[in-house]
């Protein structure tokens, strides 16, 4: 990427991702390099290619021109020194955790987490003996109180899934850094809206399946590193684990990212508008959107996410589990589906799907009730989305 492009705002840079140069011209779009094996003129050159993430391309599991373009684009988006692309968001998460943790280590994690991440920590505890302490994310003193000599990692989400809690990221990360503990932040919900590395985070995670890809047609994950040495350290583990992103998936993600600036603005505006309307509906007991004044993290969200609080929020239906199941089955424009961040509006009942691994007590601790429904707002006209939600609520 040229020095000129580095001077542009993120919304502009993302339209001009780094492209591997070809003789005599420069393609505007990133080419799809589907080949996975590269030949070398001598054994020394091939041996050198195995040494790090920036070496010559030789075998897909270690790197590919299209995949590297995606890694460079997302690293630039987050202000990192480098990135690793994985076959899914969970692939990125597990690669990072298994590279950095070993038996006997201790992790401090936000209490309200994506169900897959919560389950991964439970698995690490059961099989590896990695101990996990959960904190609310509201007070850095919770982190300081939870610290142990064996603490290796602080794990947070910029906006939690599904109840849209916003932790006090800078202070929490600062408390971890004081103790020499690495911090990992899942920024899937808020690309372009927040850059955790600027607040001291060491690693930023994205499920690129969601907003980065943006069209529900690709599965991918990224881990972005503030420090080059840490990037290299995790890369050596990543290539052995094999959670490698396919070049075509990388190409689709790059294509989707070019409209991220336009899409994220529509997601944000529509979600806030719909959350406000739902808060006044008699069938809704509570709305969990940090852009609304009644949300417990409202002032924090305005400070940390001044350009928007994301396109995903949750509602608690007054009729509980049965009302939630009826509602998600009654939508027509929206779809009942287990993802988010695409152009379509999606609804989900977390207690029976994405967070099914949690016990009743763990669901309560995460703020998820039997009648909680997650709404991931798409880019359809907000009046059409509202008409659909309203007709579904009318049947309760």
Image (cartoon, rainbow, N blue to C red):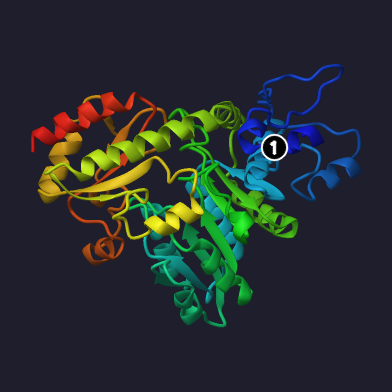
* Residue occupying the point 58% across, 57% down: 96
| Number of marks in the rendered image | 1
Could you tell me which secondary element the residue under label 1 belongs to? helix
- On screen, residue 97 versus residue 354, left or right, reads right
- Residue 114: give x, y in percent of width and height: 39, 53
- Residue 44: give x, y in percent of width and height: 91, 44
Give the image quarter of residue 236: bottom right
- On screen, residue 80 versus residue 161, left or right, reads right
Q: Residues within 10 Å of mark 1 (few under 14, many from 20)?
A: many
- On screen, residue 88 versus residue 51, left or right, reads left
**Residue at the top extreme, as displayed:** 24
- On screen, residue 81 versus residue 373, left or right, reads right
Residue highlighted by disc 1 = 68
Along the viewing direction, whichever of 306 and 43 lies nearer the viewer: 306
User: On screen, 135 above or below 119?
Assistant: below
- Residue 323: give x, y in percent of width and height: 12, 44
* Residue occupying the point 70% across, 20% down: 28
- Residue 192: give x, y in percent of width and height: 55, 41
* Residue occupying the point 43% across, 46% down: 309
Give the image quarter of residue 17: top right
Give the image quarter of residue 138: bottom left
Q: Quadrant of the N terminus?
A: top right
Q: Quadrant of the C terminus?
A: top left
User: On screen, 215 above or below 133?
Assistant: above
Residue 312, can we see it? yes
Residue 376, can we see it? no
């Amino acid at each position: 990427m040229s020095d000129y492009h580095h001077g542009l705002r993120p919304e502009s840079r993302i339209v001009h991702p780094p492209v591997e140069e070809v003789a005599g011209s420069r393609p505007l779009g990133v080419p799809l390099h589907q080949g996975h094996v590269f030949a070398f003129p001598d054994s020394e050159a091939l041996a050198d290619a195995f040494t790090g993430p920036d070496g010559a391309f030789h075998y897909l599991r270690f790197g590919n021109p299209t995949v590297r373009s995606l890694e460079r684009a997302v690293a630039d988006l987050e202000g990192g020194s480098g990135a690793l692309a994985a076959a899914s968001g969970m692939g990125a998460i597990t690669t990072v955790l298994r590279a950095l943790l070993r038996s006997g280590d201790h992790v401090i994690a936000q209490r309200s987490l994506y169900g897959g991440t919560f389950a991964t920590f439970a698995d690490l505890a059961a099989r590896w003996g990695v101990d996990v302490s959960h904190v609310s994310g509201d007070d850095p003193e919770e982190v300081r109180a939870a610290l142990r000599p064996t603490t290796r990692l602080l794990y947070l989400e910029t906006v939690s899934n599904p109840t849209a809690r916003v932790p006090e990221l800078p202070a929490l990360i600062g408390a971890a850094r004081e103790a020499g503990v690495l911090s990992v932040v899942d920024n899937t919900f808020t690309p372009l809206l927040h850059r955790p590395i600027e607040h001291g985070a060491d690693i930023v995670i994205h499920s690129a399946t969601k907003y980065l890809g943006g069209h529900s047609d690709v599965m991918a994950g990224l881990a972005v590193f503030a420090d080059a040495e840490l990037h290299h350290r995790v890369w050596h583990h990543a290539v052995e684990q094999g959670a490698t992103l396919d070049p075509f998936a990388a190409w689709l993600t790059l294509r989707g990212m070019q409209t991220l600036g336009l899409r994220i603005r529509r997601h944000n505006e529509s979600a806030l508008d719909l959350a406000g309307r739902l808060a006044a509906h008699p069938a809704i007991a509570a709305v969990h959107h940090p852009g609304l004044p009644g949300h417990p993290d409202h002032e924090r969200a305005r400070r940390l996410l001044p350009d928007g609080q994301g396109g995903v929020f949750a509602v608690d239906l007054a009729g509980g589990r049965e009302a939630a199941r009826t509602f998600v089955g009654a939508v027509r424009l929206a779809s009942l589906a287990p993802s988010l961040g695409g152009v379509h509006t999606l609804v989900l009942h977390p207690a029976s799907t994405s967070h099914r691994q949690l016990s009743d007590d763990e669901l309560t601790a995460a703020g998820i009730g039997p009648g909680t429904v997650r709404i991931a707002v798409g880019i359809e006209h907000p009046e059409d989305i509202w008409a659909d939600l309203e007709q579904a609520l009318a049947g309760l």
